[in-house]
Image (cartoon, grey):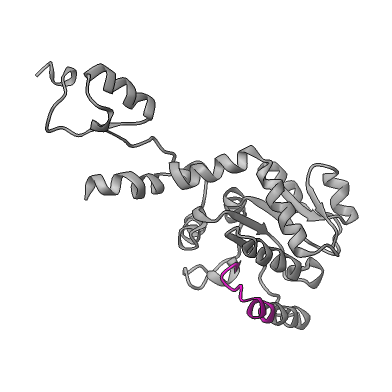
Amino acid sequence: PWKLLQEVQPHGRYITISSWRKKQLSELFGVDSSSFQIVPNGVDLRSFLGVTDFIWQIAQDLDLFHQEIVLFFPSRILRRKNYELAIHITHALNRLGKKSLLLLTGPPDPHNSKTKEYLSELCALFKKLDCEKEVIFIHNLKEKYGQDFKIGYSHLQALYSLSDILLLPSSQEGFGIPLLEAASKKLPIACSSIAPFTEVTKEHTLLFNLKDDPYEIAQRIIDFLNSQPTYHLFKKIMKTYSWEAIYENYLKELVS
């Protein structure tokens, strides 16, 4: 029995964690590398990123891990936040061939008639552009998931962690706290070039003019993210090295 690990077992199934280990074992045992199957190590993204149960369930249901670009816009529903530009940009990204999703946190103010009117306009825009599935109001999902509370700080942090870029197209602001939050998370930022934003970000973000064409902004976002090495590696890890991906791509077949 002490020789079992030193000799190839004809009825055994050999698994290695990398191509390099596969090559080493193939040479060690003197057999063809096709005798070995690779199942890589993985990372528990949910635990490592500190994602709440509520947001993790949403991420799975929205297939967030297979989106090419996840844009995050944390804001209340106010006209000056310029939601329509964010919607047009997301729509343009998808038309340019980038599977993209815009996550919005802001709930409507039930006591503000102007907010209700603005929300109705946004809903009409969704239908006009046929992009209801590309723009997600997180607040509207709470009933579906049995959640009866505000989007708290832990949920907010989780959304930042799972997103690829912060999008702030506001036409007016006094400051811009999400800029600080995104930078703290090392999240790339695309925002309008209004004075309060440029005062904080200077040359460290993708700035766009409010009058720029949404397709032009969308292409600049694509180019901006393509220049970020961490963006590409993060997407690869989410699609390939999360335990969910490893189960679907490798373990499911082994245990079935």
**Residue 248, x across and y down, in percent:** 35, 50
Residue in the foreground of this view, choosing between 34 and 179: 34
Name the residue located 16 percent from the left edge and 19 percent from the top edge. Answer: 7
Name the residue located 66 percent from the left edge and 71 percent from the top edge. Answer: 107
Name the residue located 67 percent from the left edge and 64 percent from the top edge. Answer: 90
Looking at this view, name the residue that lies furthest to the right: 195
**Residue 185, x across and y down, in percent:** 66, 43
Name the residue located 33 percent from the left edge and 37 percent from the top edge. Answer: 39
**Quadrant that contains the N terminus:** top left
Q: Is residue 152 left or right of residue 40?
A: right
Looking at this view, name the residue that lies furthest to the front: 32
Q: Is residue 72 visible?
A: yes
Q: Quadrant of residue 254?
A: top left
Residue in the foreground of this view, choosing between 190 and 156: 190
Q: Is residue 185 left or right of residue 49?
A: right
Bounds of the magenta span?
A: 123-136
Q: Is residue 42 above or below residue 247?
A: above
Residue in the foreground of this view, choosing between 132 and 7: 7
